[in-house]
Amino acid sequence: MESSTAVVVLIGLMAMIGFSACTQTQQTGEEMEWLGAWSTAQQLVEPRNMPPEPGLSGNTIRQVIQVNMGGDTLRLSLSNAFGTKPVAIHSVHVAQSTDSSAIDAGTDLALSFDGESSVTIQPGERVFSEPFSFDLEALSRLSITMHVDSVSSDLTGHPGSRTTSYIVNGDAVSAENMPNAAQTNHWYLIDAIDVKAPEHFAAVAVLGNSITDGRGSGTNKQNRWPDELAKRLQANDSTDHISVLNQGIGGNCVLKACLGPAAVDRFERDVLDQPGVEWLIILEGINDIGGVRSEEHADQVVSDLKAAYKEMVEKAHQEDIKVYGATLMPFGESFYDRPESERARQEVNDWIRNSGVFDAVIDLDKALGDPENPTQLLPKGDTGDHLHPNETGHRLIAEAIDLSLFLEEE
């Protein structure tokens, strides 16, 4: 009799829990959907940016990221987009990053891929881990540690990490610290972290070049301008449901392959395929303009940039993504400073401001320009190369973005 009573009570409790969860879903009226919490644009790693000795094959690499959105159900994606041979990974762990290579060992978690701890990524492909439970806070740092069996000589990664990675011999995926690791400021193979979030949560993707990628920001400081924008969004109760996805590649061009694929060629993978994107900021074109070598060439580049911007906006609009055009910042006295390049920059900026193609304009030319010398960067925001913003400049870019651009229309 006591056993039967216990069963009845247990069934009742289970029913109440189920009812409570159902009621909560009904009250919010929202389903949970995947949302990008962190991502980085992939490219073929150049020879000078390959992993240092001892290399990846047969060894362990620990990489640190800072996410812009929290959650308790996550998935990791890994990429072999530019490899010509399969990448074989023996195991992957995640943990809270505490300092440098150190992790909170109590949070160390092994990931699975289709029920297995190992995974092989075919050339041109990416893979997702199985969803896993993890207490991830917004703006926190996550350590991703992989014991790699073998990699393609054509390695996929993101050289402009501005964050230190750690490589040690053999299998050390659960090591609490890696004091003797080889260090390199590049990411390899890691592609994105997504979280399950209520459907009203959303992301803003940022398509750009070295300025967006963080040139001039501090190594391991996570203060690129998209990071600074994420901090502003998280600090505001009206926008703390919005994540920022940095899709910048240093040396990138809009119209052709410079460093990394042309923006028009990577647009689907780096913007449209990112989960939860509702807004896009385009700050790119300065490298195309910097390559101008004649008045005739300037005219062609201006015309082609306009067409490329329109094409990207149209593709984004088909996915109900609003697109904000950022004007190109001054480069006076830099290695790009030529009369025909400056004319092209002015014409492109005038078109961004006045064409009506974009849903809104973020006037970074005005925000970062020196009022006394408008063709030059504001001195306090200049790294000294007169092209890239310094840490102050990155903060000024983020502060120039009106957060109301990301509020739902009444």
Image: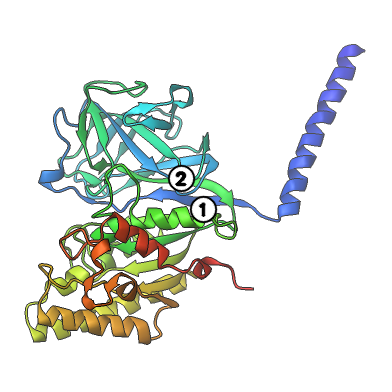
Q: Position of residue 175 (x, y in %)?
A: 34, 21
* Left or right of 340 on screen, residue 180: right
x and y percentages locating residue 115 in the rendered image = 46, 30
In this view of the protein, which residue sits in the foreground, 115 or 370?
370
For mark 2, give the secondary structure: loop
- Other-residue count near label 1 (Cα within 10 Å), few / some / many at <14 / 14–19 / ≥20: some
Kindly identify the amino acid type of the residue bearing the numbered disc 2. Leu
Name the residue tied to disc 2.
139
Name the image quarter holding residue 323.
bottom left
**Amino acid type of the residue tagged 1 in the rendering:** Gln
Task: Decide which of tag 2 and tag 1 comes sooner along the chain.
Answer: 2
Counting from the top left corner in percent of width and height, residue 79 is at: 31, 45
Q: Residue at x 75, y 53 (%)?
A: 27
Question: Would you say the residues marked 2 and 1 are in contact, meaning their CB atoms lie under 8 Å apart?
Answer: yes
What is the quadrant of the C terminus in the image? bottom right
User: What secondary structure is found at the residue carrying circle 1?
Assistant: helix
Which residue in the protein does label 1 denote? Answer: 234
Query: What's the residue at 29%, 62% (across, down)?
Result: 266
- Check the image and name the residue furthest to the left: 293
Count the marks: 2
